[in-house]
Image (spheres, rainbow, N blue to C red):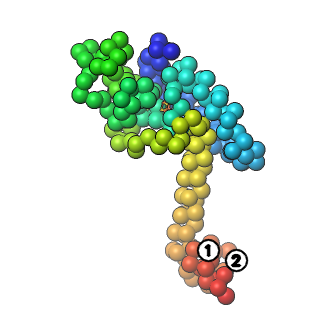
Amino acid sequence: MYALRRFAVRRSRQFEWIYQRFETVLAALDPLLTRIGYGRLERPVAFVEKQLKGLLFDCQMCGQCVLSSTGMSCPMNCPKQLRNGPCGGVRPGGFCEVKPDMRCVWVEAWDGASRMKHGDKIEVVLPPVDRRLHGSSAWLRASRERVQALAESVESNRTALARAYPEARKSAPTSAPLTEETRKEGAAR
Ligand code: SF4
Protein backbone atom coordinates (compact mmCIF):
# COMPACT_ATOMS: atom_id res chain seq x y z
CA MET A 1 0.00 0.00 0.00
CA TYR A 2 1.58 3.26 -1.18
CA ALA A 3 0.72 5.37 1.89
CA LEU A 4 2.17 2.75 4.25
CA ARG A 5 5.25 2.43 2.08
CA ARG A 6 5.91 6.14 2.45
CA PHE A 7 5.18 5.94 6.17
CA ALA A 8 7.86 3.22 6.50
CA VAL A 9 10.40 5.52 4.83
CA ARG A 10 9.50 8.37 7.18
CA ARG A 11 9.94 5.96 10.11
CA SER A 12 13.01 4.26 8.65
CA ARG A 13 15.07 4.63 11.82
CA GLN A 14 12.48 2.84 13.93
CA PHE A 15 12.10 0.11 11.32
CA GLU A 16 15.89 -0.24 11.17
CA TRP A 17 15.93 -0.81 14.93
CA ILE A 18 13.09 -3.36 14.74
CA TYR A 19 14.78 -5.20 11.88
CA GLN A 20 18.09 -5.45 13.71
CA ARG A 21 16.42 -6.90 16.81
CA PHE A 22 14.33 -9.25 14.71
CA GLU A 23 17.42 -10.59 12.91
CA THR A 24 19.17 -11.13 16.24
CA VAL A 25 16.19 -13.10 17.57
CA LEU A 26 16.01 -15.21 14.40
CA ALA A 27 19.75 -15.94 14.55
CA ALA A 28 19.41 -16.92 18.23
CA LEU A 29 16.61 -19.30 17.25
CA ASP A 30 18.86 -21.00 14.68
CA PRO A 31 19.33 -24.24 16.70
CA LEU A 32 15.55 -24.60 16.98
CA LEU A 33 14.97 -23.64 13.33
CA THR A 34 17.63 -26.14 12.24
CA ARG A 35 15.92 -28.86 14.28
CA ILE A 36 12.56 -28.12 12.70
CA GLY A 37 14.24 -27.83 9.29
CA TYR A 38 14.69 -24.66 7.26
CA GLY A 39 13.21 -26.41 4.24
CA ARG A 40 10.04 -27.21 6.15
CA LEU A 41 9.78 -23.63 7.43
CA GLU A 42 10.32 -22.00 4.06
CA ARG A 43 6.70 -21.95 2.85
CA PRO A 44 4.92 -20.80 6.03
CA VAL A 45 7.56 -18.16 6.84
CA ALA A 46 7.59 -16.88 3.24
CA PHE A 47 3.79 -16.62 3.42
CA VAL A 48 3.85 -14.51 6.62
CA GLU A 49 6.73 -12.42 5.27
CA LYS A 50 4.83 -11.71 2.07
CA GLN A 51 1.72 -10.55 3.92
CA LEU A 52 3.55 -8.35 6.38
CA LYS A 53 6.17 -6.84 4.12
CA GLY A 54 3.69 -6.59 1.26
CA LEU A 55 1.52 -4.40 3.45
CA LEU A 56 4.33 -2.24 4.83
CA PHE A 57 6.80 -1.99 1.96
CA ASP A 58 4.96 -3.30 -1.13
CA CYS A 59 7.47 -6.13 -0.99
CA GLN A 60 7.78 -8.14 -4.23
CA MET A 61 9.47 -11.12 -2.48
CA CYS A 62 12.76 -10.91 -4.35
CA GLY A 63 14.25 -13.13 -1.62
CA GLN A 64 17.31 -10.90 -1.06
CA CYS A 65 16.03 -8.10 1.09
CA VAL A 66 18.01 -4.86 0.96
CA LEU A 67 15.64 -2.58 2.86
CA SER A 68 18.25 -1.81 5.50
CA SER A 69 20.52 -0.50 2.71
CA THR A 70 17.86 1.49 0.91
CA GLY A 71 16.23 3.62 3.58
CA MET A 72 13.37 1.10 3.92
CA SER A 73 12.25 1.91 0.38
CA CYS A 74 11.99 -1.33 -1.62
CA PRO A 75 13.93 -0.94 -4.90
CA MET A 76 11.84 -3.68 -6.53
CA ASN A 77 9.01 -1.13 -6.75
CA CYS A 78 11.07 0.84 -9.27
CA PRO A 79 9.43 0.03 -12.66
CA LYS A 80 12.97 -0.64 -13.96
CA GLN A 81 13.85 -2.54 -10.77
CA LEU A 82 17.13 -0.67 -10.39
CA ARG A 83 19.07 -1.80 -7.32
CA ASN A 84 21.77 0.87 -7.30
CA GLY A 85 20.27 4.30 -7.58
CA PRO A 86 17.85 6.08 -9.87
CA CYS A 87 17.85 6.19 -13.66
CA GLY A 88 18.32 9.53 -15.40
CA GLY A 89 14.60 10.16 -15.74
CA VAL A 90 13.53 11.41 -12.32
CA ARG A 91 10.93 14.14 -12.85
CA PRO A 92 10.92 17.52 -11.07
CA GLY A 93 9.70 17.04 -7.49
CA GLY A 94 11.28 13.57 -7.36
CA PHE A 95 8.61 11.70 -9.33
CA CYS A 96 9.11 8.58 -11.45
CA GLU A 97 9.29 8.99 -15.23
CA VAL A 98 7.37 5.74 -15.83
CA LYS A 99 4.73 6.24 -13.11
CA PRO A 100 4.37 10.02 -12.78
CA ASP A 101 2.10 9.73 -9.71
CA MET A 102 4.70 7.78 -7.74
CA ARG A 103 7.76 9.25 -6.05
CA CYS A 104 10.98 7.71 -7.36
CA VAL A 105 11.84 4.83 -5.01
CA TRP A 106 15.46 6.05 -4.98
CA VAL A 107 14.51 9.59 -3.98
CA GLU A 108 12.56 7.95 -1.15
CA ALA A 109 15.54 5.68 -0.40
CA TRP A 110 17.89 8.63 0.09
CA ASP A 111 15.31 10.30 2.27
CA GLY A 112 14.90 7.16 4.41
CA ALA A 113 18.65 6.46 4.58
CA SER A 114 19.33 10.00 5.82
CA ARG A 115 17.17 9.22 8.89
CA MET A 116 18.82 5.87 9.67
CA LYS A 117 21.71 5.15 12.02
CA HIS A 118 23.51 3.07 9.40
CA GLY A 119 22.11 4.98 6.44
CA ASP A 120 25.54 5.14 4.78
CA LYS A 121 25.00 1.54 3.69
CA ILE A 122 23.15 3.07 0.75
CA GLU A 123 26.56 3.94 -0.72
CA VAL A 124 27.60 0.30 -0.99
CA VAL A 125 27.01 -1.17 -4.46
CA LEU A 126 24.48 -4.01 -4.31
CA PRO A 127 24.82 -7.22 -6.33
CA PRO A 128 22.32 -7.89 -9.13
CA VAL A 129 19.09 -9.67 -8.21
CA ASP A 130 19.27 -13.44 -8.32
CA ARG A 131 15.90 -14.28 -9.90
CA ARG A 132 16.12 -17.89 -8.72
CA LEU A 133 15.44 -16.67 -5.18
CA HIS A 134 12.16 -14.98 -6.10
CA GLY A 135 9.37 -15.96 -3.68
CA SER A 136 11.70 -17.34 -1.03
CA SER A 137 12.01 -16.00 2.51
CA ALA A 138 14.66 -13.30 2.90
CA TRP A 139 14.21 -13.52 6.68
CA LEU A 140 15.35 -17.14 6.82
CA ARG A 141 18.20 -16.46 4.40
CA ALA A 142 19.46 -13.48 6.41
CA SER A 143 19.30 -15.50 9.61
CA ARG A 144 21.24 -18.44 8.12
CA GLU A 145 23.86 -16.14 6.60
CA ARG A 146 24.37 -14.40 9.91
CA VAL A 147 24.84 -17.67 11.80
CA GLN A 148 27.19 -18.97 9.09
CA ALA A 149 29.29 -15.76 9.15
CA LEU A 150 29.56 -16.07 12.93
CA ALA A 151 30.63 -19.71 12.71
CA GLU A 152 33.26 -18.86 10.07
CA SER A 153 34.70 -16.06 12.20
CA VAL A 154 34.91 -18.38 15.25
CA GLU A 155 36.68 -21.00 13.11
CA SER A 156 39.16 -18.47 11.69
CA ASN A 157 39.94 -17.21 15.22
CA ARG A 158 40.57 -20.79 16.31
CA THR A 159 42.91 -21.36 13.37
CA ALA A 160 44.80 -18.11 14.06
CA LEU A 161 45.24 -19.18 17.68
CA ALA A 162 46.48 -22.62 16.66
CA ARG A 163 48.99 -21.09 14.25
CA ALA A 164 50.20 -18.69 16.93
CA TYR A 165 50.98 -21.49 19.40
CA PRO A 166 52.61 -24.41 17.54
CA GLU A 167 54.67 -25.29 20.61
CA ALA A 168 51.55 -25.64 22.73
CA ARG A 169 50.25 -28.17 20.22
CA LYS A 170 53.43 -30.24 20.54
CA SER A 171 53.53 -30.25 24.34
CA ALA A 172 49.80 -30.43 25.02
CA PRO A 173 48.13 -31.78 21.88
CA THR A 174 44.73 -32.23 23.48
CA SER A 175 44.46 -28.67 24.75
CA ALA A 176 45.71 -26.67 21.76
CA PRO A 177 43.27 -26.04 18.92
CA LEU A 178 43.74 -27.75 15.57
CA THR A 179 44.54 -25.94 12.33
CA GLU A 180 43.29 -27.39 9.08
CA GLU A 181 46.84 -28.68 8.36
CA THR A 182 47.29 -30.36 11.75
CA ARG A 183 43.90 -31.98 11.33
CA LYS A 184 45.00 -33.42 7.97
CA GLU A 185 48.30 -34.54 9.47
CA GLY A 186 46.43 -36.33 12.24
CA ALA A 187 44.09 -38.02 9.77
CA ALA A 188 47.03 -39.18 7.62
CA ARG A 189 48.73 -40.82 10.59
S1 SF4 B 1 14.08 -5.83 -1.28
FE1 SF4 B 1 13.12 -7.77 -1.90
S2 SF4 B 1 12.56 -8.84 0.01
FE2 SF4 B 1 13.04 -6.66 0.53
S3 SF4 B 1 11.05 -5.62 0.50
FE3 SF4 B 1 11.92 -5.42 -1.57
S4 SF4 B 1 11.17 -7.19 -2.78
FE4 SF4 B 1 10.81 -7.59 -0.59
Crowdedness near tag 1: few (<14), some (14–19) or many (≥20) residues, C-alpha within 10 Å: many
- Residue 188 is labelled as none
Crowdedness near tag 2: few (<14), some (14–19) or many (≥20) residues, C-alpha within 10 Å: few
Helix, strand or loop at mark 2: loop
Q: Closer to the camera, 4 or 154?
A: 4
Instruction: Find out whether the residues at labels 2 and 1 contact each other: C-beta distance under 8 Å.
Output: no
Residue under numbered circle 2? 174
Could one spot residue 19 in this view of the protein? yes
Residue 75 percent across, percent down from the top left = 41, 29
Q: Is residue 160 above or below residue 128?
A: below
Could one spot residue 109 in this view of the protein? no
Q: Is residue 127 left or right of residue 47?
A: left
Q: Residue at x 65, y 29 (%)?
A: 47
Q: Is residue 22 left or right of residue 164?
A: right
The image quadrant of residue 74 is top left
Helix, strand or loop at mark 1: loop
Q: Is residue 189 left or right of residue 64?
A: right
Q: Amino acid at mark 1?
A: Leu
Q: Closer to the camera, 103 or 186?
A: 103
The image quadrant of residue 92 is top left
The quarter of the picture where the C terminus appears is bottom right
Q: Residue at x 39, y 38 (%)?
A: 121
Residue under numbered circle 1? 178
Residue 16 percent across, percent down from the top left = 50, 29
Q: Is residue 15 above or below residue 150?
A: above
**Within 8 Å of ligand 1, the CB of disc 1?**
no
Residue 183 percent across, percent down from the top left = 62, 77
Q: Is residue 62 left or right of residue 31?
A: left
Q: Residue at x 51, y 26 (%)?
A: 59
Q: Amino acid at mark 2?
A: Thr
- The number of numbered badges drawn on the structure is 2
Q: Is residue 81 above or below residue 38?
A: above
